Amino acid sequence: MNTKLILIEGLPGSGKSTIAHMVFDIFADRGVEAQLFQEGNVDHPADYEGVSFYRQEEFHQLLLELEESRDMLANTSLSYGNDYLIPYRKIQHELGTDFPVELLHALFKKDIYELPFYENVRLITERWKSFVKDALQDDTIHIFECCFIQNPLTIGTVKYNVRQSEVMDYVFQLEELIKPLNPLLIYIDKQDIRSVFEKAVHERPQEWANGFMEYYTGQGFGQMQGYSGFDGTVQVLQERKKIELEIYDLLKINKQKIDNSQYDLATCKEKIKEILGKEIST
């Protein structure tokens, strides 16, 4: 096997999820062991989804403030050196309506993707480093949707509007970490960003659309530019795509770009098969 990691990237609505499943199915049909991890997976091996980070003193203060949840927090928190990780989304999924709303709000404020940019970079790069070490021990191919380029740009540009060079360096740090896995990046491109986002809004719940637009225009780059609503979100997405393509051009790992502007899944599947054929020992 030539690669142990397939990375699927692109803007919302570009077809990342569909193509990630397509890649997994192609491997399955050929008898290749693979695991698919999509956006939102609370068990992601290289990312944190719904996980809070607390320094030791902060964690102890949390236990004092939320005494009724003390036992649950003590039993579900994970030691991280001298500090703590709390996988609150996973716990919430397990407990359902028994998960206290007050606790959820408190833990969300310390979500790893709500932390300051440089703290996020530190924790995420350490997570990727640990993943690479484990992934080198077996022949499983891991398929990741959108956590390699999208997440650094989302927190760096969209949320905090840090310098573009810092966001790019974040991705390049991850690139260096994953090189031992001989990764393959598949970037799903769409020419008309407005229609791509319209498709995403149409296909997903209104709550998602409202939250997405608020996230993209109510902070960071969008807020600085004075953007708002649907049109403002499209403008932020245009900036994001510009940076993503600059990063793509500079990456040294194996990479392929697929134009999915026509949503032609049959043609796309043939292209994916052609790309993956080079990654599978026959």
Image: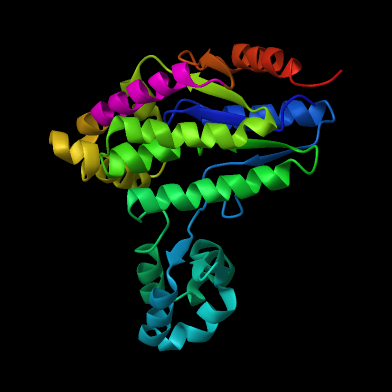
The residue sitting at the left extreme is 226
User: For the stretch drawn in magenta, what is the main secondary structure?
Assistant: helix
Compared with 275, 23 (above or below) is: below
Residue at image point 54% right, 31% down: 175
Residue placed at 38% from the left, 63% from the top?
110
Nearest the eye: 51 or 200: 51
Residue closest to the eye, 167 or 209: 167
Q: Quadrant of residue 37?
A: top right
Magenta segment boundaries in residue numbering = 234-252
| Quarter the C terminus occupies | top right
Q: Quadrant of the N terminus?
A: top right
Q: Is residue 68 magenta?
A: no
Residue 76: image x %, image y %? 57, 74
Observer-nearest residue: 8 or 243? 243
Quarter assignment of residue 212: top left
Horizontal placement of 206 versus 275: left or right?
Answer: left
At 58% from the left and 30% from the top, the residue drawn is 7
- In percent of the image, x 49 and y 69: which residue is there? 83
**Magenta region includes residue 247:** yes
* One can see residue 46 in this view: no
Q: Is residue 82 visible?
A: yes
Compared with residue 245, is residue 40 higher up or lower down, i.e. above or below? below
Image quadrant assignment for residue 255? top right
Q: Position of residue 16 (x, y in %)?
A: 53, 29
Residue 60, percent across and down? 42, 81
Which color scheme does this rendered protein use?
rainbow
